[in-house]
Amino acid sequence: MSRPPQYQQGNIIRSVTLTIGDTIAVGALTVPVLHNYSWSDPEEIRQPSQDPEPVWATTTWLETLAGRQGANVMQVDVYSRVGAPGAAYNDAYGLIAHEVMDEIESLFCGLRPGGGRFHWIPILDFTLDPDNPTDTGYCLSMQPADPSARVGQPESRNYLGIVDGFHRVTARLRFLMIRDMVRGAGFMTE
């Protein structure tokens, strides 16, 4: 027996990645967000005639337990090319990498124009029509495991310094369903 659409991990994962999108705008830069890094080529190795990406973000799912008394945990990594002094692109201090991460975090914090909160992400059903998913009526909430932390904030955010000529900023985003927040009493009682 198949799980209801709101509990299918494919729908949960796609709903979050759809919220983030495939690009993030930071000033004049359009930064690609690579949700499946294994198929990506930010260095343009397969197409050497093109310039490598100056900055990009990747997402990786570390846990997929939302709806099962757990959480879905996504790691977001932003890479920014240091470059050479005077080069067309140079993020010497990592400021652009931090700006990109700020933009990604802003997708999940604050209030929507209609009054709803950005940290509530609707779970969409992609099974019948992936191009036009339907709303399941269920939501995920982005919130850290620490109960004293604010909803809509990452669980952690770290600057990892310069490695191989790239600044790297990483964050972990934790997503839960209401049943996960309730824990034992709410498990499988909906």
Image (spheres, grey):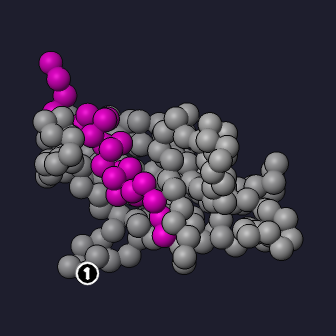
Q: Is residue 159 magenta?
A: no
Nearer to me, 138 or 10: 10
Q: Residues within 10 Å of mark 1 (few under 14, many from 20)?
A: few
Is residue 169 placed above or below 115 in the rendered structure?
above
Q: Is residue 6 magenta?
A: yes
Disc 1 on helix, strand or loop? Answer: loop
Q: Is residue 8 left or right of residue 47?
A: left
What residue is drawn where x is 47% and y is 64%?
A: 24
In magenta, the rendered stretch is: 1-25
Nearer to me, 54 or 188: 54
Q: Residue furthest top?
A: 1
Residue that mark 1 sits on: 113
What residue is drawn where x is 51% and y is 56%?
A: 32
Nearer to me, 73 or 76: 76
What residue is drawn where x is 24% and y is 37%?
A: 7
Q: Residue furthest front?
A: 49
**Residue 71 location in percent, x, y?**
41, 43
**Residue 74 location in percent, x, y?**
49, 46
Amino acid type at mark 1: Pro
Q: Is residue 190 left or right of residue 97?
A: left
In the rendered image, is residue 158 in sight?
no
**Residue 153 location in percent, x, y?**
48, 65
